[in-house]
Image: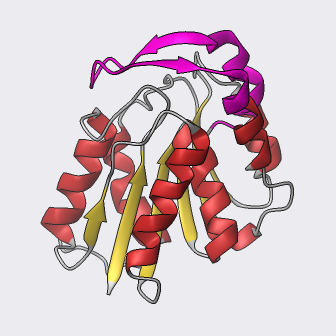
Amino acid sequence: MINMLYIHGFNSSPQSMKAQITQKFFAENYPEINFHCPQIASSPDSAMAQLEAIIGLEPHATWLLVGSSLGGYFATYLAEKYQVKAVLINPAVKPFELMKAYLGEQVNPYTHECYQVKEQHILELKALEQENISNNNYLVMVQTGDEVLDYQQAVEKYRQCQLAIVQGGDHSFIDYENTLPNIALFFNLPLISA
């Protein structure tokens, strides 16, 4: 049994374009994979409890992780804890530093949920940081034109891992759909026939 857990980013949702494109690609080409993409709770502790509960439903299955932005940070924590493979798309490396700029009221543009980003959330994020990472477990995809995150932080942190550095682009990861066959390859899934 193979399960894929897609973890969206900050103020995002399963309705985001990357989440939708990923789900469609794997449903069409690998229908045997169970695809999970929950709406992540706004507090990091609650989000992680959610994600671990999903993995806990089938602890003996093969889990494949895909994380975008803040979801990449969460995916790194889970990949280390469960020693599973993860694909990170423009991942946040130090979100606890960035989140200071978002303290106070936020509105999720997809769900319209209104919530507060608190100092406690910054501490919760810091507690999830992984100093040492498993070199073989990651495919890290960054675009140098990312206007939200410093892509060089990801290149530095994951320098021993499989890196795909694309010139230009932006935080949404332009032409993401064209990377999906490589993602499948990284997960050692059978090649799809053209």
- Locate residue 168 relative to residue 128 in the image: left or right: left
- Locate residue 3 relative to residue 15 in the image: left or right: right
Please state which of residues 105 and 140 is positioned toward the viewer in this rendering. 105
Residue 16 appears at what percent x and percent y?
Answer: 29, 33
Q: Residue at x 44, y 32 (%)?
A: 173
Quadrant assignment for the N terminus: bottom left
Q: Residue at x 23, y 43 (%)?
A: 20
Q: In this rendering, is residue 49 above or below 142?
A: below
Residue 122 appears at what percent x and percent y?
Answer: 73, 30
Q: Residue at x 67, y 58 (%)?
A: 77
- Quarter of the rendering containing residue 123: top right
Q: Which residues make up the magenta segment?
A: 92-121
Q: How is the image coloured?
A: secondary structure
Q: In this rendering, is residue 28 above or below 127?
A: below
**Could one spot residue 89 in this view of the protein?**
no
Q: Residue at x 58, y 15 (%)?
A: 147
- Quarter of the rendering containing residue 167: top right
- Quarter of the rendering containing residue 119: top right
**Could one spot residue 134 in this view of the protein?**
yes
Residue closest to the far right: 131
Q: In this rendering, is residue 70 above or below 26?
A: above
Residue 140 appears at what percent x and percent y?
Answer: 61, 51
